[in-house]
Image (spheres, rainbow, N blue to C red):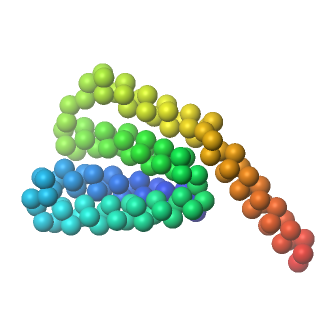
Amino acid sequence: MSYLYLAIAIIGELVGTSLLKASEGFSKLYPTIGVILAFICSFFFLSIAIKTIPLNTAYALWSGLGLVATTIIAVLIWKEKINVASVTGVTLILIGVVILNLFGPGNDEARNNDKASESSTITEIKSK
């Protein structure tokens, strides 16, 4: 369920960032209101997600996937240009997110939480 909350947080960030562009420096009322609501939603669900997902993992996913998706949105919707340096930078960040998720320090904590959760579930089943 935590990863669902994280996905909602990422979507909120994407909507907020897109509306930030549409608000034209907060000069348009409705996109500005949308920015505020989207980022409130994003940070709310991110805060729920990090109750069980290690902070470094959650933030790496939130920012990394947000960066990649925002780049795609910028090119497809806002018709912004992208060059080799931009693609290289985004790729390196994405590689960093993958490395953090596979080998980062929070992984041991996440595995221990999963094992503890499995143990308590098994104990509950045995006691019934």
Residue 74, quarter of picture: top left
Which quadrant is the N terminus positioned in? bottom right
Q: Is residue 8 visible?
A: no
Using residue 91 as the reference point, say whether residue 100 is left or right of it. Answer: right
List x then y, in percent, for residue 114: 72, 55
In the rendered image, residue 8, in percent from the top left (x then y), is placed at 44, 60
| Residue visible at 54% across and 51% down in the picture | 55
Give the quadrant of the C terminus.
bottom right
Report how many numbered discs are placed on residues in the image. 0
Q: Can residue 19 be seen in the rendering of this structure?
A: yes
Q: Residue at x 37, y 65 (%)?
A: 41
On the image, which quarter does residue 45 sit in? bottom left
| Image location of residue 127, percent across then percent down | 90, 75
Q: Is residue 109 left or right of residue 55?
A: right
User: In the image, residue 30 lies at what x, y percent?
Assistant: 16, 66
Give the left or right position of residue 21, taking residue 109 as reference: left
The residue under the point 19% across, 50% down is 21
Q: Nearer the viewer, residue 49 or 11?
A: 49
Q: Residue furthest left?
A: 27
Residue ranking furthest to the bottom: 128
| Location of residue 86 by image quarter | top left
